Amino acid sequence: MLSSSETPIVATIVLVAFGILGWGFYRARSYGKLGILAWLQSVVLMTPWLLFFGLFAAGIYINIVGVLFLLVVSTGVYIFLGRQLRAGGQDAILRQRATQRLEADALEQASPTNNSNLPEGNAQLKPEVLAIPEEDLNMIKGIFGLDTFFSTETIAYQEGAIFKGNLRGDPEEVHNRLSASLQERLGDKYSLFLVENTDGKPVLIVLPSRNDPRPMTLPQKVFAVVLLVGTIATSLETAGLLLNFDFFANPERFREVLPIGAGILTVLIAHEIGHWLLARRHQIRLSLPYFLPAIQIGSFGAITRFESLLPNRKVLFDIASAGPAAGGIVSLLMLVGGLLLSHKGSLFQLPNEFFSGSILVGTLARVILGSALQSPLVDIHPLVVIGWLGLVITALNLMPAGQLDGGRIVQAIYGRKIAGRATIATLIVLALVSLVNPLAMYWAIVIVFLQRDLERPSLNEISEPDDARAALGLLALFLMVATLLPLTPGLAGRLGIGG
């Protein structure tokens, strides 16, 4: 039964949820069948979230098994709808391509003096207003064709040029062909970007490769090493605080803090190895990680920069998600292992309220420890604390903001516009949470000053990741919320946490 204070909250959640769904349907309706299918996909992906958090606010708890079942079912339906959407979209693309080809043939026949694959209008271009040399510009224009990209206009842009026109074919295939042609003609002198224009139409941007990301300088590497040393120190200090003493004031007790400090560093290293392995697989260079020391939890994670241009959003997703996946799995194994090893007389004694601080941790602890959580103090193994800290660090990095892993994941799945809005929404939420939790304020400051900007566009910014990656991204965001969101006292009582 809902209390009078909970009723407005539930009503607000329901109204907001249906408002979002209604607004999405209103926008999708104008796009016909394809728009409705895309809207249904978003509904399917939102359904587990709405059910879980809606019922949670109403005081009804769905256990982990139920959540996983909902996610599996929604993923299956999402993939099915995705296939229907692609099939319908492919038909529309084929019809559009046929129409465009007829128009192009008509243009070519109407311009008998034009012996190239480009419309005559491009011959009237004034290359002197462009930063690209005329010889290079002509070679770049020569890579376009009726079956790839039908260029209609060239505009100066920074040190390069924007080519407007009609995309002919699958974006990924076209971009690969044009990039290979550009490489063959001009080597590594220029980079070719396929992006959406402000009007939603695809355009090609050619920029000199000297604008590509650069490797770290020696001072930057030294700074990264200094931050690593600082993170080691704060990890040891965090361990000391957990053991009820100040390590900085008692460095001779180094052996006592070493196991917990090493555990925190293990999670951080696993996270970075995950990024590195996927970056190496896709032949992307990464900078050394800039670790962010934090006495509260040892570290806020690390900032890692791309030193290569990313070929597409799939690669951005793979590299961004690999770090949290590796660090999260290691942390989860530590947490579960520590809970299984916990017994009377274990090193730590924590109040049972500790397990109400996270839906994920509280649920796992209830499953493994059972009635032991009803005691005022619960004896737990140190691995529980390390695993919990690791999950918090992983969850903080999964927040959908800027160049955090979560922000990169959102940008990879939904594009730059949605990622920008998600960043603003995340900062607003952190500002509100910081009124009761100082950690949120610190993390908001880190984002604003260091991570608020979006990742630079991929070479192919139009092709979207597949449905499986989209589902995995939403699962990661769901686990982030489940880690950071606390249990209400009522739900904690129903789970048997506390007396």
Image (spheres, grey):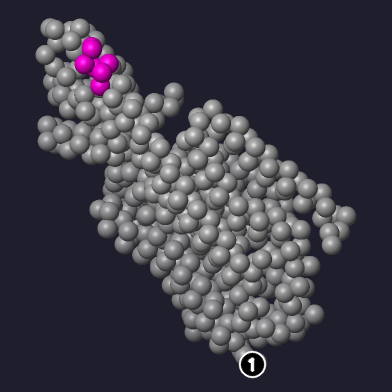
Amino acid identity at mark 1: Gly
- Quadrant for the N terminus, please: bottom right
- Quadrant for the C terminus, please: bottom right
Q: Position of residue 48 (x, y in %)?
A: 60, 56
Residue 104 against residue 297 in the figure, above or below = above
Q: Main secondary structure of the magenta part?
A: helix
Q: Residue at x 12, y 7 (%)?
A: 113
Q: Residue at x 49, y 76 (%)?
A: 333
Q: Is residue 467 left or right of residue 244?
A: left
- Regarding residue 401, the answer to whether it shows in the image is no
218 or 476: nearer the viewer: 476
Q: Residue at x 70, y 55 (%)?
A: 54
Q: Residue at x 55, y 82 (%)?
A: 338
Q: Secondary structure at mark 1?
A: loop
Residue 139 against residue 240 in the figure, above or below = above
461 or 70: nearer the viewer: 70
Which residue sits furthest right?
Answer: 4
- Regarding residue 9, the answer to whether it shows in the image is yes
Q: Position of residue 448 (x, y in %)?
A: 55, 44
**Does the magenta portion include 105?**
yes
**Does the magenta portion include 83?**
no
Q: Position of residue 141 (x, y in %)?
A: 19, 22
Graded by Cα atoms within 10 Å as few (under 14), some (14 to 19) or many (20 or more), the crowding at tag 1 reads: few
Q: Which residue lies under the disc numbered 1? A: 345
Residue 72 against residue 238 in the figure, above or below = above
Q: Quadrant of residue 52?
A: bottom right
Which residue sits furthest bottom?
Answer: 345
Which residues lie in the magenta part?
101-107
